[in-house]
Image (cartoon, helix red, strand yellow):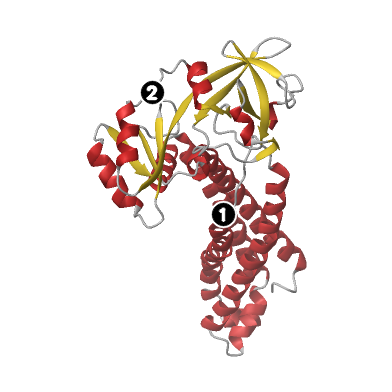
Amino acid sequence: MMLHDRVQLIATTCGVVFAVVLSTQQLGILYGLFHKNTMLIDNGGADIWMMPRGTQLVQRGSVLPESALTQARATPGVLVAEPLVFGPGSIARPEGGTEQVILVGTALPNALGGPWNIVAGQASALYEPDTLTFEVAQRDKLGNLNLGSVREVNGRRVRVGAFTWGLVPFGPAYSFAEIGLARDLTSTATGRFHFVLVRVLPDADPDEVVAELQARVPEVQVWTSQQYHDTVVSALLAQQLGITFGSSAALGLFVGLVIVALSMFSSVVDHQRELGTLKAIGCRTRDLAVMLFAQAVMYGLIGSVVGLAVAAQLTAFMRSPNLAVMLPIGVMVSVPFVMTAICLVSATLALNRIRKLEPGMVFR
């Protein structure tokens, strides 16, 4: 039935493609938001993060005492421990108004916490006085910003030393500075910081180092980078983000279920005399069910392949410094299985119709 009715084949396949594209794009945007909000953790070069208790996202909290850094550096298994300053910045635009950034103060030369993804200039420019990195997506907003341009940040004139690409979390872009400059810009007292980033020795177990650090500095929260990453993702899912994008992805799958179910049911209705003939000459319901499910599998596989190809092209087209649409390999691999399962479920409606077919109807 499938190959002999080209119109229905195309219509049903398009329905599956639509479901695949809609659901994968919603999941891609959700994964992109996860990436945006965990990029500092994933790319900061640290194995362990120390932060104020109660921290769930990558954001400015209360400052940590200097003893947290001292204890971290004295803990067995620690290769290096560096402070990180985190705070808001307001850039004065030449034509008036301001643009917000998140200032990240990193300790050189280890530069745990960034910067990365530098597309112009060098990270070493941060050694120079009053020098920051800026996000390339902000160039036009800040009056055609270029390397060496001077702007006022939190009332202090600073110079552009490098540009990064895509370092825009769920909010203002990251702007990196040497930690001393960042302290001045964010009014953070000398010897105070918002995070401690730890890199362990090659033969050290990060979980064991975390336990030791937690025992030495019980007033702060100590997590491995993976634990911190997972905490941020869980916190985002608990908000409206997970509900919104999850429901949109589920809607796409439901649309695919309905389209395939209606298409296969109408196909059975349109060809019930032929199916009745097959029953009359000895075909069992089981044989017809195998044929029906084989069609469902073909719809699922063809629609998935085409849908993933379209989704990949849309993802590349939508990619920008401000918007990340990510399709992890796990999602790409699971889509054909999920859509095939949905098509098989859809086929059960048509199967019920086949069961009710009487061979004698052919002779009426």
Q: Tell which of 91 and 360 is nearer to you.
A: 91
The image quarter containing residue 275 is: bottom right
Q: Residues within 10 Å of mark 1 (few under 14, many from 20)?
A: few
* Image quarter (top left, top right, bottom left or bottom right) of the N terminus: bottom right
Asked if marks 1 and 2 touch (Cβ < 8 Å), the reply is no
- Kindly report which numbered mark, 1 or 2, lies closer to the viewer in this rendering: 2
Q: Earlier in the sequence, mark 1 or mark 2?
A: 2
The image quarter containing residue 128 is: top right
Q: CA distance from mark 1 to mark 2?
A: 38 Å
Residue 205 position (above or below residue 273)? above
Residue corresponding to mark 2? 192
Q: Tell which of 282 and 131 is nearer to you.
A: 131
Horizontal and vertical percent position of residue 113: 50, 37
SS at mark 1 in the image: loop
Horizontal and vertical percent position of residue 310: 71, 54
The reply to whether residue 364 is visible in this rendering is: no
Q: Tell which of 301 and 91 is nearer to you.
A: 91
Q: Amino acid at mark 2?
A: Arg
Check residue 105 in the rendering and tell me which mark sits there, or answer none.
none
Residue drawn at x 37%, y 58% as measured from the top left: 203
The image quarter containing residue 306 is: bottom right
Is 204 left, or right, of 290 in this rendering?
Answer: left
Residue drawn at x 58%, y 90% as measured from the top left: 282
Horizontal and vertical percent position of residue 25: 61, 47
Q: Residues within 10 Å of mark 2 (few under 14, many from 20)?
A: some
SS at mark 2 in the image: loop
Horizontal and vertical percent position of residue 121: 70, 34
Residue 82 position (above or below residue 335)? above
* Image quarter (top left, top right, bottom left or bottom right) of the C terminus: bottom right
Check residue 328 in the rendering and tell me which mark sits there, or answer none.
1
Residue 115 position (above or below residue 97)? below
Q: Residue furthest bottom?
A: 282
